[in-house]
Image (spheres, coloured by chain):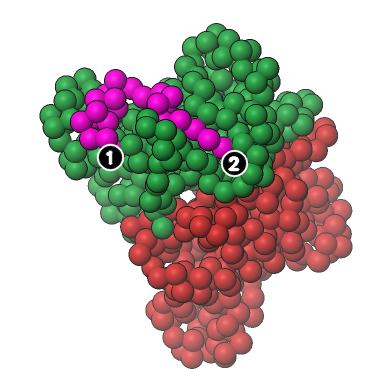
Chain colours: A red, B green
């Protein structure tokens, strides 16, 4: 992302100068006034690179608040760094905006978008380094590349889980997909005993991920394998198991659920499959050797991140076995979510 | 970009396994089988980061060959590295594909796209490290982030040009925008004395940039300021001048033009303004101190990159002065191209 700084600059230059240059506080951003960004890599570290995109009408609703769209776009990337034990260094933003939108409409959308992006950049210690803004005949699309770092050789992979490792997840599972159902009005809140606070909780969990970057160091120190839960717990766990050459067993009674999710599941037990396979949790699932679970939980508590043991890694192959409240295996139509 | 490697994976996993995993030859790509990529930064270097996106119907035509779309998407990013004196280390790909396209149609488009991307990655020494593939209700969009490196402190900036520096450009100017006119059939080739070869030359220059990465070291060694010419020579030069606190004078008779561009300008001299302000050249414009011009030209010749002196940096402010064949200043309606 570059801008001439001149008043007679192009529309892109104007957008950058007005909305994004104020975010470019990192010296390597060069004020967004050059063609590239500069980053001095930390010593004795490897860089951890990740890119994730979201598209209006697919990953968020066109009328979602621009601030939450910005938060989602950055945080889904930060979530991957957290799950790999990496700390963020900065990000690049690629933004497609609908061609032909009026200047006031574009400014009205970009003002809260850029403000929220700047606040998140500061809160997560992940400054804007550069980017590109293009016009598109299609919907808004935001692609963010984050750059993080781990001490050399310490990246936490999907592979590495060993039979006997305990499986832990952070936070609560299923809120976002239930929030999406409520948002789509496919689930009427009152039918599920949800009050306004419960409804708002679920919808906000869909709108705004809470990546667990505070836990990155504990993951790096204690986990034998980890990934973020973005496409559904069971499907993502299946990927971790496949990469590790193992399988797993989890118990649904141990799943950490929010009060609102508990209420919805009490009213409609069939939503359990949705909770297990729905996307957008942005929590961390990790395998931790039994003797390290105590230290991991202590570190999580110190970081203010809830973590819950939900099962264990088992020798073997194939999809993880999900044991329901009655002790029987839960059958899932699909293990994870795909837009394709 | 991640894939489970399992046959029952999601549509995204299938696309990645089929089309992109074969490109993931760099060990840091982790086979596209984890959540992130790893990169060991070179010693004593700063990282140079750049992201540029292209959208179907805006930066390329929906019926452009998928191979040339891939080449354009990567090369416009490589061009920025070249102009800053940086060498490429790798790239991340963010790809939005139309939702609802049939699997055969998607495969038919992605097969040549991915093959060309892989060939360019090898040719430019810029391996695929990771990425994300998403479905979109809109057109194809490709956002690429390249990561490069320069020895610490040696990035060539837009600022740094000094009065008296000579201005040089690589290759030829204006071919791409003339190719676009021909492609749009706004300029009938036969009216401009273009034969099939001339027509094909111009259109291919629009379709497929030729970034000057072979010249990066010479730019880094000799240029006091540089940028790539992507939005039009005069507008981009104005940005370099503004960043350097100087202005410039260039002479149109010294502009390096291809034979085909010469023919079109001979038939329609009014196209000179288009050549000067049209985009998509992806050449390098740089300021070089007079005593270094000889060494720079020798290095360019050794690298096989044509370079031509077109003017000089002048003390003062304001837009560069463009001197036409008659010695008078050429007036330009606009100095550069903007989609907004």
- From the viewer's perspective, tell me whether residue A183 is left or right of residue B214: left
In this rendering, does residue A301 appear at all? yes
Specify whether residue A162 is painted magenta: no
Q: Earlier in the sequence, mark 2 or mark 1?
A: 2
Any mark on residue B270, and which? 1
In the rendered image, the residue lying farthest to the left is B190
Specify whether residue B251 is painted magenta: yes
Q: Position of residue A217 (x, y in %)?
A: 80, 50
Part of the protein shown in magenta: B247-271
Distance, label 2 to label 1, CA atoms, is: 25 Å
Chain letter for mark 1: B
On the image, numbered disc 2 is attached to which residue?
B247
Please report the residue visible at 46 percent of the width from the left and 78 percent of the height from the top: A183
- From the viewer's perspective, tell me whether residue A20 is left or right of residue B109: right
**Mark 2 vs 1: CB contact within 8 A:** no
In the displayed structure, A159 sits above or below A120; it is above
* Dot 1 alpha-carbon crowd within 10 angstroms: few under 14, some 14 to 19, many 20 or more: few
In this rendering, does residue B89 appear at all? no
Identify the image quadrant of residue B300.
top right
Please report the residue visible at 49 percent of the width from the left and 63 percent of the height from the top: A278
Q: Position of residue A223 (x, y in %)?
A: 75, 46
* Dot 2 alpha-carbon crowd within 10 angstroms: few under 14, some 14 to 19, many 20 or more: many
Q: Nearer the viewer, residue A340 or A49?
A: A49
In the displayed structure, B331 sits above or below B197; it is below
Question: Is disc 1 placed on a helix, strand or loop?
Answer: helix
Q: Dividing the image into 4 quarters, which one contains the C terminus of chain B? A: bottom left
Please report the residue visible at 34 percent of the width from the left and 49 percent of the height from the top: B58
Identify the image quadrant of residue B100.
bottom left
Chain letter for mark 2: B
């Amino acid at each position: 992302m570059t801008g001439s700084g001149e008043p007679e600059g192009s529309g892109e230059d104007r957008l950058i100068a007005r909305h994004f240059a104020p975010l470019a506080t990192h010296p390597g951003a060069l004020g967004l006034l050059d063609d590239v960004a500069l980053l001095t890599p930390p010593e004795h570290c490897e860089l951890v690179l990740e890119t994730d995109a979201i598209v209006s009408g697919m990953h968020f609703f066109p009328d979602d608040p621009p601030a939450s769209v910005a938060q989602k776009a950055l945080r889904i990337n930060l979530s991957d760094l957290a799950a790999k034990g990496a700390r963020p260094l900065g990000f690049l933003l690629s933004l497609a905006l609908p061609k032909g939108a009026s200047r006031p409409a574009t400014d009205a959308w970009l003002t809260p978008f850029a403000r929220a992006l700047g606040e998140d950049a500061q809160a997560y210690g992940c400054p804007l380094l550069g980017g590109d803004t293009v016009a598109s005949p299609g919907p808004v699309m935001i692609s963010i590349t984050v750059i993080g770092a781990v001490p050399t050789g310490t990246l936490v992979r999907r592979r590495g889980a060993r039979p006997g490792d305990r499986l832990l997840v952070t936070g609560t599972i299923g809120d976002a997909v239930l929030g999406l159902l409520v948002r789509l009005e496919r689930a009427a809140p009152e039918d599920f005993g949800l009050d306004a606070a419960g409804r708002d909780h679920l919808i906000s969990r869909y709108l705004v991920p809470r990546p667990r970057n505070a836990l990155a160091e504990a993951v790096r120190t204690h986990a034998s394998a980890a990934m973020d839960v973005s496409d559904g717990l069971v499907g993502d766990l299946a990927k971790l198991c496949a990469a590790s050459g193992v399988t797993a067993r989890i118990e649904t009674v141990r799943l950490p659920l929010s009060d609102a999710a508990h209420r919805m599941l009490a009213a409609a037990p069939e939503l359990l499959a949705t909770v297990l396979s729905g996307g957008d949790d942005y929590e961390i699932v990790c395998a931790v050797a039994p003797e390290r679970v105590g230290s991991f939980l202590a570190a999580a508590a110190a970081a203010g991140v809830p973590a819950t043991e939900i099962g264990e890694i088992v020798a073997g192959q194939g999809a993880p076995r999900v044991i329901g409240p009655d002790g029987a295996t839960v059958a899932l139509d699909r293990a994870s979510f795909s837009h394709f």
